[in-house]
Amino acid sequence: MQIYQQGRKPILQLSLLFVNIWQLPVALAPNFASIMVGRALGGLSSAGGSVTLGTIADMWEADSQQYAVAFVVFSSVGGSILGPIIGGFSEAYLSWRWSIWLQLIFGGFVQALHFVLVPETRTTIMMDNIAKKRRKTGQDKNIWGPDELVPFRDRFSAKEILVTWIRPFKMFLTEPIVLTLSLLSGFSDALIFMFIQSFSLVYKQWGFSTVAQGLAFIPIGVGYFIAWFSFIPVIRRNIAERKAKPDDERVQYESRLRWLLYTAPCLPIGLIGFAWTSTGPPLPWIASMISAAVVGIANYSIYMATIDYMICAYGPYSASATGGNGWSRDFLAGVLTIPATPFFTSKSRNPIEPKI
């Protein structure tokens, strides 16, 4: 069955548009239920992560993609701390609705920037555009792109749409490596977002203001930077190893997960360290922030290694494989964030102090 393409750019533009539109009912919500509905619709409209990874597959070969993947992963995980940092100032000086308006303003700016600066990268669409340009200039009036002769209404069928939509979930459930790596990535993200919910409770013990509580997320960003830079020599060595052993499948694929063996343990180490140093004075607040940075190292490394492996191993179906990974991260993080604060506050009189 021939599947016709609409390109990366229109999908990203539509996704950004709908995400921005669904900010409006949240900002204007009269009650909590309306907020939840608006946020759910915004989440359903978010296609940016998987499509961006597809763009990387368009622009780089599997052997040279790792530096680009590392940057995209950093931009993705960095968003989880950018919101709280800006949100601290917003909460301190503005009403809560301004947190949503700021997201809408930033989202509109990003969409405009993407529209102006980012070209189409899908090869079939680029061929269509080149053919149109050559006909328009009279250079070659008999040249046509792969999809140009097919009417728009014939480019999709309900079956094609359903198969494409189901494929990420099917791979998630039937491919053992996709399931394992996606659950690892989702579990990591869920722990991170639950962990983030504890920050206001933890740093109030040291008298942190609302702004200071937001700035307390900076150490996680430091951990992301450390992890990102730690992958640079690993990637360089991995590229050299793949060139030296082009017929070794383990070197070509599984070797991309090797650094994760050493960085994934940072997740339990950081969480345990944070738990033991978050009980307030007389312990110094910097101790808990060091542990937060260690957690950041693990979160970046897990996402980077799993995504890099899936893009390389699944080739044309990498968007579906990483789609399962993204769904696992977003779903588990979203579900477990809601009960996090009630869970922390119900454990003891001192919300963070462990019972013995």
Image (cartoon, rainbow, N blue to C red):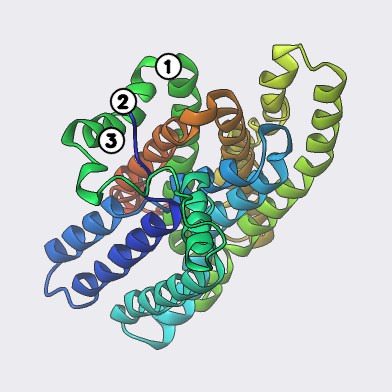
Find residue 139 and report its image quarter: bottom right
Residue type at mark 2? Met
Residue in front for this viewpoint, 273 or 55: 55
Q: Report whether 228 appears left or right of 243.
A: left
Label 3 element class: helix
Residue 78 % position (x, y): 57, 58
Residue in front for this viewpoint, 265 or 83: 83
Answer with mark 2 or mark 3, whichever residue precedes in sequence.
Answer: 2
Residue type at mark 3? Trp
Residue type at mark 1? Glu
Residue 174 % position (x, y): 36, 15
Residue in front for this viewpoint, 111 or 38: 111
Answer with mark 1 or mark 3, whichever residue precedes in sequence.
Answer: 3
The mark closer to the camera, 2 or 3, is 2
Q: Report whether 202 appears left or right of 5.
A: right
Say which mark, if any, is on residue 330. Answer: none
Q: Relative to 189, say whether 182 is above or below.
A: above
On the image, numbered disc 2 is attached to which residue? 1
The mark closer to the camera, 1 or 3, is 3
Q: CA distance from mark 2 to mark 3?
A: 16 Å
On the image, numbered disc 1 is attached to which residue? 175
Residue 27 % position (x, y): 24, 76
Badge 2 vs badge 3, beta-carbon distance below 8 Å = no
Q: How many marks?
A: 3
Which residue lies at the image location 31% right of the left edge and 63% below the top edge? 19
On the image, numbered disc 3 is attached to which residue? 165
Q: Is residue 79 visible?
A: yes
